[in-house]
Amino acid sequence: EIVLTQSPATLSLSPGERATLSCRASQSISKYLAWHQQKPGQAPRLLIYDASHRATGIPARFSGSGSGTDFTLTISSLEPEDFAVYYCQQRSDWPPLYTFGQGTRLEIK
Amino acid sequence: QVQLQESGPGLVKPSETLSLTCSVSGGSISTYYWNWIRQPPGKGLEWIGYISNSGSTNYNSSLQSRVTMSVDTSKNQFSLKVNSVTAADTAVYYCVRGRDTSNWLEYWGQGILVTVSS
């Protein structure tokens, strides 16, 4: 089973700053990684899929990069509404299994 | 805009069967993949499995022996059953539509909290 490890566990930044979140896979997953944002009391929202493609309606300040085992989500300039928990997620077609990282909490400094 | 809404009992007794339904509006259930994800209180996300528009299923191997998914195209709904539940099955359960054939988890329901307790 592929394990996703996110770092850091918590990231404290101020609005306007740049955020860099990491996700490392225990084995190569090519480009098959997504990022989701979850705010308290809400369902997650898909931000990025296939490592670098923004989902519908996602602002351009969110970008994803990486392939193989190392991936990054970058938020270029933090807005107040960006403070949330972020999960990376991978999908494998065989055996079919989708797994999530443990999450990075992005909090206001 | 597609919308998904979970429904079902919020309280289930240990050893009984958890049954949830997801109602889909704004689009046909006859396409895409339809997933269930769960999140124990204060914890991370776990994929339970999916059912395709053709009715084929794939389940997380950790739950496979206890999970059944089905789809009712006449009602535009799909369902989840988890049998022999324990307190460890207490979670918010989300139904999620995949993005095209890739099945990236794109459209999420609001979630429903199911508590397993006597």
Image (cartoon, grey):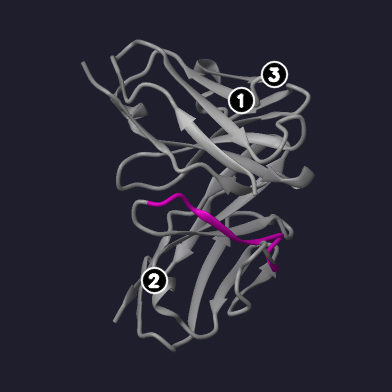
Question: Around disc 1, counting alpha carbons within 10 Å, would you say few (fewer than 14), some (14 to 19), or many (20 or more)?
Answer: many
Label ID, residue B77: 1
Residue at numbered disc 3: B74
Cα distance, mark 1 to mark 3? 8 Å
**Label 3 – label 2 distance at C-alpha:** 41 Å
Q: Residue at x 70, y 21 (%)?
A: B73
Residue lying at 66% horizontally and 41% vertically, measured from the top left: B26
Residue extending farthest to the bottom is A16
Q: Give the quadrant of residue B10.
A: top left
- Judging from the image, mark 2 belongs to the subunit labelled A
**Nearest the eye: B50 or B96:** B96
Q: CA distance from mark 2 to mark 1?
A: 34 Å
Q: Amino acid at mark 3?
A: Ser
Of residues B113 and B39, the one drawn nearer to the viewer in this rendering: B113
Q: In front of the other: label 3 or label 2?
A: 3
- Tell me whether marks 3 and 2 sit on the same chain: no
Q: Determine whether B16 is above or below A67 in the image.
A: above
Amino acid under disc 1: Gln
Q: Is residue B1 left or right of residue B65?
A: right
Amino acid type of the residue that numbered disc 2 sits on in the rendered structure: Phe
Q: Which region shows up in magenta?
A: A42-53
Mark nearest the camera among 2 and 1 is: 1
Q: Is residue B31 magenta?
A: no
Q: Position of residue B18 (x, y in %)?
A: 41, 18
Q: Secondary structure at mark 2?
A: loop
Residue B18 bears which disc, if any?
Answer: none
Count residues near mark 3 (Cα–Cα under 10 Å), then give few for <14, some for 14-19, many for 20+.
few
Q: Name the foreground residue: A11 vs B19.
A: B19
**Chain letter for mark 3:** B
Residue on which the image places disc 2:
A83
